[in-house]
Image (cartoon, rainbow, N blue to C red):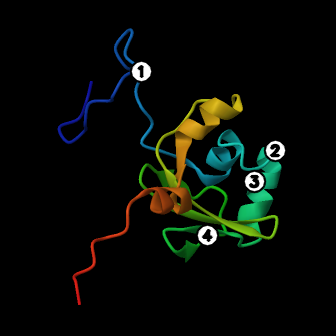
């Protein structure tokens, strides 16, 4: 019997309805997005301070990542800027991994420059 102040528990999703995750651990997301080869490497990358989340350095591999967050990754003497667009349940092939992020640098290059007023 529930007490007066308790909330009802949320049960499993209805049959045939998959719940989209709201967040995911940073090291898991990096591994699923095929940024690194192993989850341990992803955790080491974060612990080394080579990942920024929305401009702030993150050193905890368990830090949550949400859709819309921007990750700055220092990899192989290159800096990558990725916007999180989704999550996948497990590591898959490269085309599937590409659905989890958008490269912000290529996104900016693809958009036309703003109109400049005439002088």
Comparing 72 with 1, the one in front is 72
Mark 3 or mark 4, earlier in chain: 3
Name the residue carrying label 3: 42
Residue in the image at 61% along x and 53% along y: 26
Q: Quadrant of the C terminus?
A: bottom left
Residue 18, label in figure:
1
Corner quadrant of residue 13: top left
Q: Position of residue 27 (x, y in %)?
A: 67, 51
Residue bearing mark 2: 38
Q: Nearer the viewer, residue 38 or 13?
A: 38
> Label 3 neighbourhood size at 10 Å, few (<14), some (14-19), many (20+)?
many
| Distance between mark 3 and mark 2 Cα atoms | 6 Å
- The residue closer to the viewer here, 106 or 40, is 106
Left or right of 101 in this view: 9: left
Compared across the picture, whether 12 is left or right of 46 comes to left
How packed mark 4 is, by other alpha carbons closer than 10 Å (few <14, some 14-19, many 20 or more), is some
Q: Name the secondary structure under disc 1.
A: loop
Circle 2 packing at 10 Å, graded few (<14), some (14-19), many (20+), is some
Q: Which residue is mark 4?
A: 58
């Amino acid at each position: 019997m529930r007490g007066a102040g308790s909330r009802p528990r949320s049960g499993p999703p209805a049959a045939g309805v998959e719940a989209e995750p709201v967040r995911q651990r940073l090291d898991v997301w990096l591994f699923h997005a095929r940024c690194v080869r192993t989850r341990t490497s992803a955790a080491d990358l974060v612990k080394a301070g080579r990942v920024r989340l929305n401009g702030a350095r993150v050193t905890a591999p368990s830090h949550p990542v949400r859709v819309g967050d921007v990750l700055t990754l220092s990899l192989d003497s290159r800096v990558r800027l990725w916007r999180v667009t989704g999550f996948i349940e497990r590591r898959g092939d490269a085309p599937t991994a590409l659905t989890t992020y958008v490269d912000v640098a290529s996104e900016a290059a693809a958009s036309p420059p703003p109109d400049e007023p005439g002088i």
